[in-house]
Image: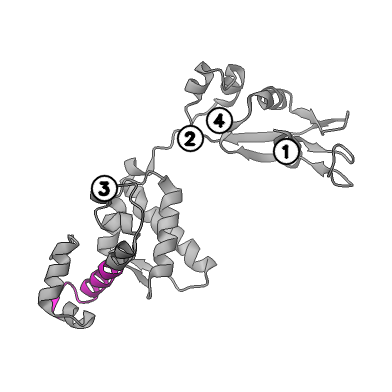
Amino acid sequence: KDLLESELFGYVEGAFTGAKVKGKPGKFELANNGTIFLDEIGDLPLEMQPKLLRVLEEKEFERIGDTKIIRSDFRVICATNQNLEDLMEKQKFRKDLFYRLNVIPIYIPPLRKRQKDILPLARHLLKKMTLAANRSDMDIEKTAVKELQNYDWPGNARELSNVLERAMYSSDNNTIYKGDLPFHLNYNAQAQGKNKKPTLKDAQSQAQIKAIYQALARTNYNKAKASKLLGIHRTLLYKKMKEYNIGLKPE
């Protein structure tokens, strides 16, 4: 809470051990004539909440160790993944602060309830990743698209971002195939058990799944051509497809 207070309100020289020689402006001071975004507001310590309420109401505050009043005109946007009404009942969040913040509430449904948003968001994130990694643009193959759309995404956009980043680095070309997706997405993870620790056998299976899906996608699901591409007999390909629950036709 002490670090949070210094970050929000700033401090003057000598305010505490380790303070910068010339002090430091806080985020509310820097947000003058602009916007300050407070993420995870539900985690704000209870003893900090009256101080935040005063700043919101008065638009003025003092740096730590100073008596000079600083006025700042700012707009506030807050976010939380917690139920603030429940926190108020448990006396972990002040009612007066809640009503001060809850002017224009915006509810964002979880990603699993916005299936139409998954693909546009995935492509947007992937474009940012390839740009940051200095790689050429990547496409998402249609069976991989279905896998992304059918997944429950308990971790929402952050989990989607992590999945795409992993797939980007595991892919050896400019297309993400279903087999490039993490093991828990494409090999019936629920049947395997959510708490199952990864093993060498899992890694080998994932590598085989990836190779099979890539071969099928590149040959438009022609089993003879796919088995030739993989360097195995067509009978073994059918056996592996059955073992890994890979459909004979694109899903």
The residue closer to the viewer here, 251 or 17, is: 17
Magenta region, main secondary structure? helix
Q: Of the two numbered discs 1 and 4 on the same chain, state the one appearing first in sequence.
A: 1
Quadrant where the N terminus sits is top right
Label 2 CA crowd tier, 10 Å (few <14, some 14–19, many 20+): few
Badge 3 local density, few (<14 within 10 Å), some, or many (20+)? few
Residue contact at pointers 4 and 2, CB within 8 angstroms: yes
How far from the left and from the top, in percent, is residue 219? 20, 77
Q: Which residue is mark 1?
A: 3
Residue type (three-letter) at the residue carrying disc 1:
Leu
**Which label lies toward us, 1 or 4?**
1
What residue is pinned by disc 2?
81
Residues drawn in magenta:
207-224
2 or 3: tag closer to the N-terminus: 2
Query: Circle 3 is placed at which residue position?
Result: 190
Q: Is residue 117 visible?
A: yes
Q: Secondary structure at mark 2?
A: loop
